[in-house]
């Protein structure tokens, strides 16, 4: 028996020695050899390269293998000891037989111990404990060692819930567990999970509340993780989430320098894998300090040189002849370096000078191109104005267009009269003046006919615009910027009346279609009973009767015109078309006309305030626009379109500089005309340009708001230079400044008649916005 045990021990020892010799490497290191099941395919027949130097991974594997071998040897010794004790305690054949069986099974147990990983401590293993708080039903999940007792679990949960441990009762499957029992005794396996209920003995004084509100905890209790175990093999592992008992600590982070975004380090539940101790101190100051040493080394290998001698010939074909050059002193070397530096500096300065010249040429070219563009823009703008003026002469449509024609007619008459007075005398002069008067009368008649045609055309456009506006749906902008449209019963009614009016005015239709339109119109207006609807029905019946008698369409033109006119009056009645109420100029309620009606001193009519044009001259404020236009046609025949352009440009420039400016919007065309003609004599203040198409009003002092007493009339070419002046007293002469101030005094005296502008007559600078760039768009 003892011999058999010795043989078994000898075999185990020889096998361990053989494994040790097989895994040994030069240098005394013994790297770990992976087990049969852990070896990678294709490496079974590889040989160990003896020349390869061991790496850190090899040293780490060798340490782990040595520890594994020590554990294996210890397990083997523990297995041998009980069997020895059993053998010593037995006697007879039974003991001998059992000893033999034990010794026979010993190699198998040792082989299993070799393949088994490191022995685990079962008592220190943890399990997931889910505690249900009664009666709230909240669940607390903790990781607890299965070797600890229920009393320690109570103390841990009491510290988390902040209640005394004596009031807690823990039950499993409906029965209360004892405090001395451990989780292992309750049947909990290592790395397993269990579910328990916990209640309070005094729920009024010490209620059980969850550590965190349930709405703040959205993490699942169990998740499934897919882990790759091989090249194409995967395994699903069930992982239970451990609830954190407190907020995770701040572990630092970093901040992005450009965007300013902060990134924090994250904390995890899994502890990092502990590296084995290799016995070498690597975290020390010596490993982080660099030392510089200078030491002379003598080569330990002797080197010989072959020389020609007796019996030995060495060829000199590849030899080189080396001749010494001129010796250069330190001063010569530094002088040569200084000359090279000066040469490099000269080239660099030349390159910089070329770059500067190239930049100046580019800026000059860009400046000339900008000036040419500005000149072209001003020329195009002037040509556009002249082109528009000629178009208005040939196709007049508005009142301003006919004022332009009458102004041109008056200018032509004055020129012809001056020529006649200068060249003719006596009866010839009278005959020429009479002929001139006849021509003027003919031209006035032609203009009148054009005016009547334009009024008819404008009447049709006005009616069409009125019908389109009344039939248009209500629109507004939503919060997201979308345009929303809504149709009401009134807009639908207005759209039906519009379509019926358009069908009534159609001329190229046959008799059947015309009868259908008339019947539709008759049924539409008969919905309301009044004198207007009765007149429309009578006219419709009359046209139907004449059409059935075979009267031609040309003879019915006047009757159809009357029907169309009466139906338009029907559409404009708010009682029949409610949408027309918001488009009528005269309100239907007479009470609203009480404070908005004024008497015209020219035509002696009571008109609304919109028919009067407010001006600074109080003598003309009591005349309506029609009387003023008629007086202009009969007398001066002036054209104010140029002054309208000046006022429009002034308002646009001031809106860009200071949107809160008010005076430019208080002025009217007549006021601007008075400023240009009377105050500034229709000439530029600097060079005396008299072209009204190129004159604009700008600020005299750029840091004050525009007003008639803080302005100057300049041409478009002069505005850009004037607006760059910071101090006008340094840029202009005293005589010029006094002349401008005199014009400002005249303007202040004239416009002081307007009561609304009285608050702006303060000679002190206005409290407007400080303008950094007051160049208007017209000057740029």
Image (spheres, helix red, strand yellow):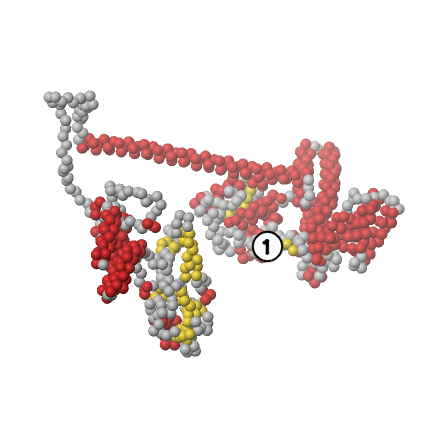
Up-down relation of residue 50 to residue 617 (above or below): above
In the image shown, does 101 or 154 lie closer to the viewer? 101
In the image shown, does 735 or 204 lie closer to the viewer? 204
Q: Secondary structure at mark 1?
A: strand
The reply to whether residue 311 is in sight is yes
Residue 745 in picture, x, y percent from top left: 53, 50
Residue 772 in picture, x, y percent from top left: 46, 49
The reply to whether residue 127 is in sight is no
Up-down relation of residue 656 to residue 574 (above or below): above
Q: Is residue 503 left or right of residue 662?
A: right
Q: Is residue 489 left or right of residue 211?
A: right
Residue 558 in picture, x, y percent from top left: 82, 47
Q: Which residue is pictured at 26% across the width and 59% down the height? A: 100
Which residue was labeled with disc 1?
Answer: 477
Image quarter of the N terminus: bottom left
Q: Which residue is pictured at 21% across the width and 47% down the height? A: 28
Residue 758 in picture, x, y percent from top left: 55, 57
Where on the picture, by quarter, is residue 79? bottom left
Q: Is residue 583 left or right of residue 16?
A: right
Q: Is residue 430 left or right of residue 55?
A: right
In the image shown, does 630 or 131 lie closer to the viewer? 131
Q: Residue furthest right?
A: 549
Where on the picture, by quarter, is residue 266? bottom left
């Amino acid at each position: 028996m003892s011999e058999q045990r010795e043989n078994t021990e000898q075999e185990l020892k020889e096998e361990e020695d053989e494994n040790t010799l097989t895994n040994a490497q030069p240098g005394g290191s013994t790297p770990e050899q992976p087990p049969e099941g852990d070896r990678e395919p294709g490496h079974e027949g590889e040989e160990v390269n003896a020349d390869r130097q061991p790496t850190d991974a090899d040293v780490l594997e060798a340490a782990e293998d040595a520890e594994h071998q020590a554990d294996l040897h210890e397990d083997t010794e523990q297995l041998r000891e009980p069997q020895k004790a059993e053998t010593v305690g037995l006697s007879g054949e039974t003991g001998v037989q059992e000893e033999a069986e034990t010794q026979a099974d010993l190699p198998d147990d040792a082989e299993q111990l070799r393949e088994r990983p490191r022995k685990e401590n079962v008592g220190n293993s943890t399990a997931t404990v889910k505690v249900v708080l009664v009666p709230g039903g909240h669940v607390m999940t903790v990781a607890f060692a299965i070797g600890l007792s229920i009393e320690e679990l109570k103390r841990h949960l009491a510290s988390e819930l902040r209640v005394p441990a004596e009031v807690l009762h823990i039950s499993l499957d409906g029965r209360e567990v004892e405090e001395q029992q451990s989780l292992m005794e309750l049947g909990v396996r290592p790395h397993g999970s269990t579910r328990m209920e916990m209640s309070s003995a005094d729920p009024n004084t010490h209620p059980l509340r969850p550590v965190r509100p349930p709405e703040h905890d959205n993490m699942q209790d169990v998740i499934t993780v897919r882990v790759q175990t091989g090249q194409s093999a995967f395994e699903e592992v069930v992982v239970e989430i451990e609830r954190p008992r407190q907020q995770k600590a701040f572990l630092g982070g970093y901040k992005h320098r450009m965007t300013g975004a902060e990134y924090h380090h994250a904390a995890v539940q899994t502890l990092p894998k502990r590296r084995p101790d290799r016995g070498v101190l690597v975290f020390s100051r010596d490993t982080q300090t660099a030392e510089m040493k200078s030491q002379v080394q003598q080569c330990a290998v002797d080197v010989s040189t072959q020389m020609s001698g007796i019996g030995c010939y060495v060829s000199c074909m590849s030899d080189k002849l080396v001749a010494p050059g001129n010796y250069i002193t330190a001063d010569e070397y530094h002088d040569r370096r200084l000359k090279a530096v000066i040469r490099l500096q000269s080239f660099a300065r030349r390159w910089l000078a070329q770059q500067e010249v190239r930049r100046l040429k580019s800026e000059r070219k860009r400046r000339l191109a900008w000036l040419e563009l500005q000149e072209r823009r001003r020329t195009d703008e002037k040509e556009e104005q002249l082109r528009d003026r000629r178009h208005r002469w040939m196709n007049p449509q508005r009142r301003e267009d006919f004022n332009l024609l009458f102004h041109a007619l008056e200018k032509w008459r004055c020129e012809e009269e001056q020529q006649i007075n200068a060249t003719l005398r006596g009866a010839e002069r009278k005959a020429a003046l009479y002929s001139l008067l006849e021509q003027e009368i003919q031209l006035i008649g032609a203009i009148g006919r054009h005016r009547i045609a334009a009024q008819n055309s404008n009447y049709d456009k006005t009616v069409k615009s009125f019908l389109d506006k009344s039939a248009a749906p209500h629109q507004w902008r939503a919060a997201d910027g979308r345009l929303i449209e809504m149709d009401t019963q009134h807009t639908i009614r207005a759209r039906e009346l519009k379509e019926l009016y358009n069908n009534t005015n159609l001329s190229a239709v046959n008799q059947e279609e015309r009868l259908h339109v008339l019947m539709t119109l008759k049924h539409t207006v008969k919905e309301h009973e009044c004198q207007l609807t009765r007149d429309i029905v009578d006219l419709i019946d009359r046209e139907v009767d004449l059409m059935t008698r075979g009267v031609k369409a040309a003879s019915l033109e006047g009757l159809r015109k009357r029907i169309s006119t009466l139906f338009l009056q029907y559409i404009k009645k708010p009682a029949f078309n409610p949408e027309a109420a918001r488009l009528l100029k005269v309100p239907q309620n007479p009470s609203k006309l009480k404070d908005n009606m004024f008497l015209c001193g020219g035509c002696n009519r009571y008109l609304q305030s919109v028919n009067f044009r407010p001006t600074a001259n109080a003598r003309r404020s009591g005349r309506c626009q029609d009387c003023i236009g008629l007086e202009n046609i009969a007398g001066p025949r002036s054209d104010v379109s140029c002054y309208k352009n000046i006022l429009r440009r002034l308002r646009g420039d001031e809106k860009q500089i200071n949107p809160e400016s008010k005076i430019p919007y208080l002025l009217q065309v007549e006021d601007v005309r008075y400023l240009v003609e009377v105050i500034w004599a229709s000439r530029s203040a600097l060079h005396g340009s008299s072209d009204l198409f190129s004159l604009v009003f700008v600020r005299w002092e750029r840091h004050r708001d525009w007003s008639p007493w803080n302005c100057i009339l300049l041409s478009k070419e002069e505005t850009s230079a004037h607006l760059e002046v910071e101090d006008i007293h340094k840029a202009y002469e005293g005589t010029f400044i006094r002349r401008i101030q005199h014009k400002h005094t005249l303007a202040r005296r004239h416009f002081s008649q307007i009561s609304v502008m009285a608050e702006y007559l303060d000679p002190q600078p206005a409290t407007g916005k400080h303008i950094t760039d007051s160049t208007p768009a017209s000057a740029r």
